[in-house]
Amino acid sequence: MESSTSAPGGVHPLTVTVDPRVHARVPGYVLGLIAVADIEVAGASGPVDGLLTAAEDALHTAGLGKAEVSALPAVAAWREAYRTVDVNPNRFPCAAESILRRVAKGDRLPRINALVDLCNAVSLDSRLPVASCDVGDIAGELAVRPADGTEVFAPLGAPDATECPDPGEIVYADGRGRAHSRRWNWRQGDVVKTGAGRRRLLLTVECAHEDGRPAVEEALERLAAALAGLGADQAPPVVLDRTAPYATLFAPSAATVR
């Protein structure tokens, strides 16, 4: 299975839902979304590389060790959320903790393309998981929900080596029985990877701590500003929480949030 490599044609609404079972376990979970109907993803961007380098430099200067990264409030909340859904955060750290640990050691992240690098920059600064998902092959629905164990996940870089998530594991799942993440946001799947070229994208920002919505909104604002500079055809950001658990995106009118 591969991501779509061509621009989307016509209107294909996508309803993104957070299952109530997720909020029952992690009441503070907030999911921020930006629907990008069309963008030419460049292999590199000088301004984006500057943002990522500045974020790396700031983390290098902070001199955080592994334990200190794990103790950052936003990261600590994710570690607790993972434990709540029976995932060991030491073995499976959330996406933000993974890159924070790497950079805190003094490393720099590999440059992938303008969108992936942008998400990494905002993730390092906000301490939140931030991702770009190619949804050109997804229509109808995308749900953050516990897996039933029958979903098919195509690992990033190895789409033919499919696997099934564990029952109860939180995943991003579509209406075709495919999971596009493992263990919430620990790993992204190959179907939704963002490559260079013309794309239809969904950008996500997630937090797991109570009162985390302002941090999600700030990260969304930073993403939106950078996307405008990259020539994205984007909709206004949308935020889902336990009071508004779903939204319809990529519709002819503005997104509907409920």
Image (cartoon, grey):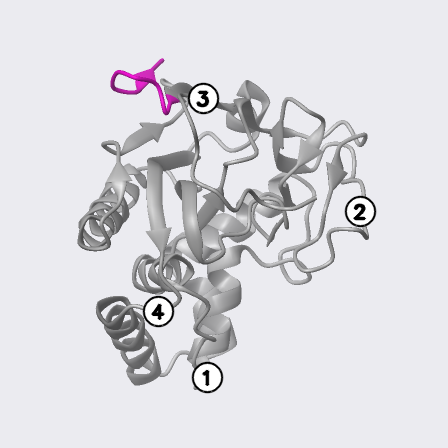
Upstream in sequence: badge 2 or badge 1: 1
Are the residues at dot 4 and dot 2 in contact (C-beta closer than 8 Å)? no
Residue stretch rendered in magenta on the structure: 249-258
Spatial CA span between label 2 and label 1: 31 Å
Spatial CA span between label 1 and label 3: 40 Å
Are the residues at dot 2 and dot 1 in contact (C-beta closer than 8 Å)? no
Mark toward the viewer: 2 or 1? 2
- Secondary element at image label 2: loop
Quarter location, residue 138 = top right
What is the crowding at mark 4: few (fewer than 14 residues within 10 Å), some, or many (at least 20)?
A: some
Mark toward the viewer: 1 or 3? 3
For disc 1, the marked residue is 107
- What amino acid is labelled 1 in the image? Asp
For disc 2, the marked residue is 162
For disc 3, the marked residue is 12
- What amino acid is labelled 2 in the image? Thr
- What amino acid is labelled 4 in the image? Ala
Dominant secondary structure (helix, strand or loop) of the stretch shown in magenta: loop
Residue 48 versus residue 8 in the image, above or below: below
What is the crowding at mark 1: few (fewer than 14 residues within 10 Å), some, or many (at least 20)?
A: some
- What amino acid is labelled 3 in the image? His
What is the crowding at mark 2: few (fewer than 14 residues within 10 Å), some, or many (at least 20)?
A: some
